Image: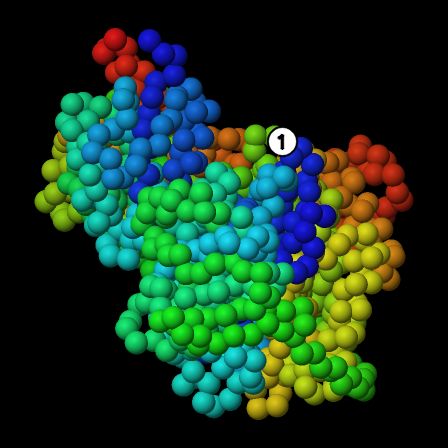
Amino acid sequence: MLQGPGENAGVIDLGDGEAVAFKVESHNHPSAVEPFQGAATGVGGILRDVIAMGARPVALLDGLYFGDPGHMFRRAVAGIGAYGNSVGVPTVGGETRFDPAYRENVLVNAMCVGLLPAERVTRAKARTAGHTIVLYGATTGRDGIGGASVLASQELDDESSEKRPSVQIGDPFTGKKLIEASLELVERGLVESLQDCGAAGLASSLSEMASEMGIDVHLDRVPLREPDLEPWEIMISESQERMVAVVRADMLEAVEAVCAHWELPCTRIGEVTDTGELRAFHDGEVAGSIPARLLTDECPRYEVEREPRAAEPHAWSEPTRDDPNVESKEWIFRQYDQLVGSRTVRRPGLDAAVLRLRPSLRGLAVSLQGPRLGERDPYRAGAQAVLGAALNVACAGGEPLGLTDCLNFGNPEKPEIGWELERAIEGIAEAAEALGVPVVSGNVSLYNETEGRAIPPTPVVGCVGLVPDVRYVPRGWREGDAIVAANAEGLAAEAALVRFVARVAPLLSLAHDVGDGGVEAALVEAARWSGVGAEVDVPQRARVVLACPPERVGRLGAQFEQIGEVGGTTVLGEIIG
Amino acid sequence: MTERPRIAVVVFPGSNDDRDAAWALHALGAEPVLAWHGDEELPERVAGVVLPGGFSYGDYLRCGAIARFAPALDAVRRFAADGGPVLGICNGFQILCEAGLLPGVLRPNRSLEFVCRDVRVRVERADTLLTARCTHGQNLTIPVKHGEGCWYAPDELYAELAGLDQIVLRYEDNPNGSVHDVAGVCNREGNVLGLMPHPEHAVDPLLGPADGAFILASLVDAARDRERAFV
């Protein structure tokens, strides 16, 4: 692990001089109010987090939780496509769930994965007094003022639609130029540190950068989209597509030349000091001043009250085949560019996608997964999300290396929600420990409530794994293959199953984890993905179904019950192809 | 004489598949060079040009409507008028139509949705510079990924183009509703080709179908021939 929690994204060493940066983040409240821009700017925001680490974004994944696949959902999908497709980063996976529990509080979680040389991890914190603070990218306006506070940190109600002006508007074209300019700055070693301007705007990014030193910022120098912004508005505007860099004096001209090449405004707005203060000036007068650490490491903390809720039975029902949760999701990911970057070895549709680490034959398997639909126990929800995401990566031939989590919960000021959070975190931590895999980054989204009704505990977990040789990624079962099933119950057994599947994946033609729909649905999905049917006796319980040529079953190194054979044009009465 | 012919990939702000095109051209034996949209001349010794996929200048207006004014486009026009091979892929096809180098226009997909999937296209002409490696009637599997790929021409123009044999590729399974299933057209001289499918995303067999190599290798051959003719 090269970078754990506390920076813009976590970074893990892949060996051979390469590293991967990744993080998942929520954009739930803006998406509930305006799904297209909410989802689009969610994608833009997570991209900038990964760029701030000095990494080139190579994949996006989305966790979408909606009441139904209606208008709101379609607008969110269109927004994700509008941003991701335009900036040239492929969307390769994720998860979509429909449940009436999310009707009023939709969840849009976006994950970004980026690649960088292992020795070039860029960080946000300023370290030397005298260096210049440079703001580059879009101009600053009144859009998104209070996005983080007005929207994200309150419950939704009847008046929420009036908060539409608090939703930021995405500009993917500027976003694309920002990606290319930032990578050029990092690759040429022109910047000391980088930070994206996200929630709470300059106020938040500058305080994070200043926490170990101090920063003086001159707000009158910030290029504005409209005249007469008040200093406080400039400080907290959430105008999108902006980055802040710390630059050495002798590099300033080179930095400005790079931004000019990409036709991006670039302004010296302040300097690093050793005062420990974040001071904001406007026309030479101090408009505000605060010890920077009070906004970061030493911010006020409060103890969340926790009170266990009476055990609730899970709310899942036996899914039918025409349940939108079980039906193919192809109509969704067909709207996303899955290929740009020329790395996509395994496209979305089953478990995890695989990206080739060109020019080598190694690959990255990536997945994003929440708990079982209808799960109401927060501990189990957390553990399920971790094990599910890791098993998805293993099914695509990847050895899980790192996790990132997004905790979507109700109002934490309520003791039972505080308890839910605590239990979910324990579930995530214990499952990660059982796997021996670190959680390197994450995000919380709280106050997902409408008129006092909270969403179910929904921890969503992203997993990144290393594929030793992409030529042996399971791509689909073939005529004559044997189908076997494996089960595992309990943390230790499921973690062992993940390791086993990752190890034997090169021998397999297919591995697929059993999801909400049960074993039958998993077999139908596997057959659709492969384009070949099968004859099977459905076992009562299974966590994963595997397929390989019959002569290889013995080499898997464990005892399996063969449950069927691949062949024909149907499976369990469904016509394939 | 260099072994690898130089092929320019013109980069606009908002180009996305520029590096992909350069990578595929290199894999197929060319020396790709990235050319910037603001440059008035193509790089030296360039013997072929690719206008890559993406969203030039954001394409908030009609796709390609701004890119056609780029200084580099004047250089591409001169290069094409001189008989040089020019390939426009997706956004590149849109730009060539907007610039008047190719006939027709590209409208939003009939579905009004972006579409990303493999499609099969039939080669209607294997005698152009940019399809010389193909055979007439050959089916190629190549991915599309676009929101505005529905090629359109009014009936009279279409009849004229069909009569002059300028329809080079047709979809077997039309993903966007283009008239007469048109997937790619060329200019009258046959040295400028535009297509919506992405041949640069169908070169590495580890990433899926590899039929795009037939078209890109034709471009590399044409560039090599042009380079030889000038030496």
- Residue on which disc 1 sits: A361
> Residue visible at 62% across and 77% down?
A446
Task: Sort mark 1 into few (<14), some (14-19) or many (20+) by Cα contacts within 10 Å.
Answer: some
Camera-side residue of A211 and B185: A211
Determine whether B115 is above or below A461 in the image. Answer: above
Q: Quadrant of residue A95?
A: bottom right
Q: Quadrant of residue A398?
A: top right
Q: Tell me if I can see residue A276 in this picture.
A: yes
In the displayed structure image, the side of residue A74 where residue A562 appears, left or right: right
> Residue visible at 89% across and 44% down?
A559
Q: Three-letter amino acid code at disc 1?
A: Leu
Q: Position of residue A88 (x, y in %)?
A: 43, 48
Q: Position of residue A123 (x, y in %)?
A: 59, 52
- How has the structure been colored for display? rainbow
Q: Residue furthest right?
A: A559
> Residue visible at 25% across and 32% down?
B193
> Residue visible at 81% across and 84% down?
A308
Determine whether A450 is above or below B76 in the image. Answer: below
Give the structural element (helix, strand or loop) at label 1: loop
Q: Position of residue B229 (x, y in %)?
A: 23, 10
Q: Position of residue A65 (x, y in %)?
A: 57, 70
Camera-side residue of B1 and A309: B1
